[in-house]
Amino acid sequence: MLSDAQWSELEPLVEACRPKAKTPPQDLRRTLSAILWRHQNGAKWRAVPQELGPWWRAAQIFIRWSRAGVWERLLSLVQERGVQLGMVFLDGTNVRAHQKAAGAAKRGDLGPSEIIVKLLAARVAAMGPRLA
């Protein structure tokens, strides 16, 4: 999903934001592609294509980085560079909530990170070559 040009632009920003661990994540480019794919398509983690790596690794990195605030830092770095993010429109006419959905935030709620990754996914899509 991430082309060489897109990855060369994103890699230094990701390296500046991600938490430094004893061992770096394996195939970070592929894992980020899986995270972006999942958020662009609105699919469940288990639906991530096999060529983007194990779904559980992408889910695990997304959750860990969400709790560590990595997505917020990455979005601010992308915006500081003057990158214009795309727009997303949602049609909520058929969206129904369960009767018990009162809107209270759950412990460890990842909502803001979901939105930030969707913005980054829109940015990556905008970076791609345009088809005539």
Image (cartoon, rainbow, N blue to C red):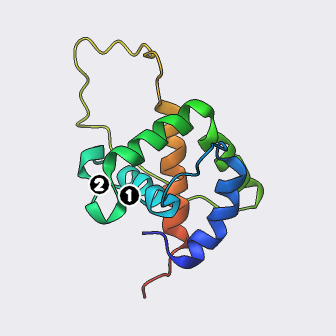
Q: What kind of element bears circle 1?
A: helix
Left or right of residue 59, residue 23 in this image: right
Q: Which residue appears at 42% of the width and 16% of the height?
A: 106
User: Which amino acid, by three-letter code, is at mark 2?
Assistant: Val
Q: Earlier in the sequence, mark 1 or mark 2?
A: 1
The residue lying at 32 percent from left, 54 percent from top is 41
Mark 2 burial class by Cα count in 10 Å: few <14, some 14-19, many 20+: many
The label shown at residue 73 is none
Q: Position of residue 49 (x, y in %)?
A: 27, 60
The answer to whether residue 96 is left or right of residue 110 is: left
Q: Which residue is mark 2?
A: 48
Q: Residues within 10 Å of mark 1 (few under 14, many from 20)?
A: many
Q: Secondary structure at mark 2?
A: loop
Taking depth in this image into account, of 62 and 119 the one nearest to the observer is 62
**Which residue is label 1 attached to?**
37
- Mark yes or no: residue 90 visible: no
The reply, left or right, for residue 37 in relation to residue 19 is left
Question: Quadrant of the rendered structure where residue 103 is?
Answer: top left
Q: Position of residue 80 (x, y in %)?
A: 77, 54
Number of labelled discs?
2
- Mark 1 touches mark 2? (CB < 8 Å): yes
Frontmost residue, 115 versus 88: 115
